[in-house]
Amino acid sequence: MTTANPEETASTAAPEALTLRRWAGAWIKDRARTLQEALERPLTSYYLLLGASALLLVIGLIMVMSASSVYAYKYYDGDSYAVVKKQLMWVLLGLPLAFVASRISQRWLRRLIWPGYIAALGLLLLTAFVGTTVNGNKNWLMLGPVGIQASEIAKLALVLWAGHIYALKERRLRNLHEIVMPVVPGLLFATALVLLGKDLGTALVFGAILLGVLWVVGFPTRLFTIALLVVGSGALFFVGTSKTRLIRIENFLNPFKDFQGAGWQAGHGLYALSSGGWFGQGIGASQQKWGDLPEAHTDFIFAVLGEELGLVGTLLVIGLFAVLAYAAIRVARQTEDMFVRYVTFGVVVWLVGQAVINIGMVLAFLPVIGIPLPLVSYGGSALLPSLIALGLVIGFARREPEAARALAHRKQARQKMSRSSGLSARG
């Protein structure tokens, strides 16, 4: 019986391992090249924005249906689907508005901006003085049987208004006075109206929008740093004016320190996420939504999503927001139209920034401040402006010169194919 020579075995295995590594390296390079080619296509941003928005909307409807079922059964005479029916109504109303926004000409859009800005400020004023207080914040305005959050409408109005003003001033933006006036006072006035209603969470989103547009128009770095510190200091000051906020700040890093008090919501949110595991308990199987987790279908819907869909579901939602951010920033960078650039970047800061705040709040990285997850949380006041904003950005993407040519070429090809099919049928 002969034994194998170790040197011969090693010399035989080494080429095989080398060949496998080369094959794997070539395969990875080929996939990377394919992905790069796909990302460079003219309609990539358009399809990424459309696909990510649609998936988030579908996930939102599913999660609202699941997370609100117990709440709806309790407060709507045994109808477990009452809340999701309302959300579906808002979606069916918002989709046509988003479509119109994607097709509206820039000339008509910009004619509506000043009236929209003035109307938004009017609604904020009414809310500050005659609004309805919910959970300690006066941020609801009752218009007959319908309640709206004027601050959600104002987010869209402020982004469009700031983009319009800066686009008109494009050649004068090297002057500090031109950058500041009138956008900074206008946004600060709107923020002050929100703070009158003690809605610090929305005020922080307004502050993020302000900082975002200042950054993209080239606000000097030193002054931008000072502005960032001012916004942060202002937030801390207003936290100190409320005992409830102070308690939340003291407990957000360790909600279980006061689990029966200020840490109740954040603690149960963490319980929900931790019990989801890799793949979740399944749609409808959440235990925390049975009264333990307040605002399960609004501000803390991400916790229920983690419990029912697991880590995979939460990463999917985070990934979809990352795709939205990538595609929108790609549109903003490639366009030569300054209005499109400023508005698109403002929408990214608003929606993705709000998503980051909401997810950070659920993960106990940030204190609970009552911010919904865009496109996913329940609420028509937040959903409609978000859909209109995304419709505008999708319209910007499809009207980019290369994208418009690609769409026109596809349309001509379909018409030619249709005519050829018709002639063949008649023949």
Image (cartoon, helix red, strand yellow):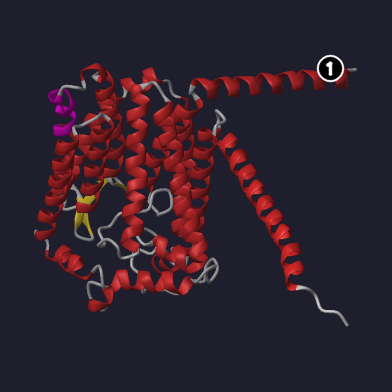
Q: Is residue 326 magenta?
A: no
Amino acid type at mark 1? Leu
Task: Give yes or no for residue 177 being in the magenta stretch.
Answer: yes
Examine the image and state in which quarter residue 179 appears. top left
Judge left or right: residue 318 versus residue 4.
left
Classify 93 as above or below 165: below
Q: Residues within 10 Å of mark 1 (few under 14, many from 20)?
A: few
Image height of 185 relative to 276, above or below? above
Q: Nearer the viewer, residue 194 or 226?
A: 226
Residue 338: % across, % down: 34, 23
Residue 37 % position (x, y)? 59, 34
Is residue 32 visible in the rendered image? The answer is yes
Q: Residue at x 17, y 42 (%)?
A: 225
**In this picture, residue 423 sits left or right of residue 47:** right
Of all residues shown, which one is farthest toward the bottom?
A: 1
* Residue 355 in picture, x, y percent from top left: 36, 51
Q: What span is colored magenta in the figure?
A: 176-185
Which residue is nearer to you in this view: 413 or 190? 413
Indicate whether 218 appears above or below 58.
above
**Image quarter hosting the C terminus:** top right
Quarter of the image for residue 169 reads top left
Label 1, on which residue? 423
**Front one among 129 and 314:** 314
